[in-house]
Image (cartoon, rainbow, N blue to C red):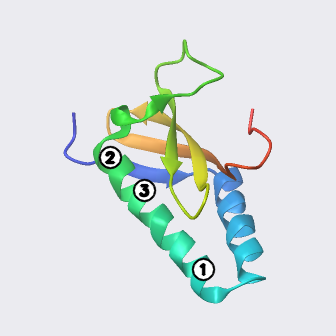
Amino acid sequence: MPDQYTVRFTRAAHDDLTRLHAFLLDYDLDTADRALDAMDHAWAMLARFPFSCRKAEHAPSHALLREIIIPFGASGYVALFEITDASTVTVLAVRHQRENDYF
């Protein structure tokens, strides 16, 4: 097991992050920046401990497909990711917890 995994993002996950940030920018720049900080903290944790995150609720038999909860405000975000190989984690999608599911 590596000391740290490389965290990469699919185009869809990158688009999700852009959309979520743009939504908050409509309200408050400081809030949008704090949300990005919360996500950066989550990615750092994911790079160190991806197996500590829960298995994806809709795919319990796929042990390498997991979710990380990103606390922020009254609800926060959830990111779907896959432990791609022995040194890489791929974020597949990111949603606000009040959005429809990403499956």
Query: Where's residue 69, x and y in %?
Result: 51, 46
Q: Residues within 10 Å of mark 2 (few under 14, many from 20)?
A: many
User: Circle 3 sits on which residue?
Assistant: 43
Front residue (pair 31, 93): 31
Camera-near label (3 vs 1) is 1
Disc 1 marks which amino acid?
Thr
Q: Is residue 78 above or below residue 86?
A: below
Task: Judge left or right: residue 10 versus residue 98.
Answer: left
Q: CA distance from mark 2 to mark 1?
A: 29 Å
Query: Where's residue 16, x and y in %?
Result: 70, 58
SS at mark 1 in the image:
helix
User: Circle 1 sits on which residue?
Assistant: 31
Q: Which numbered marker is on residue 5?
A: 2
Quadrant for residue 85, please give it.
Answer: top left
Q: CA distance from mark 3 to mark 2?
A: 10 Å
Q: Is residue 92 above or below residue 20?
A: above
The C terminus, quarter of image: top right
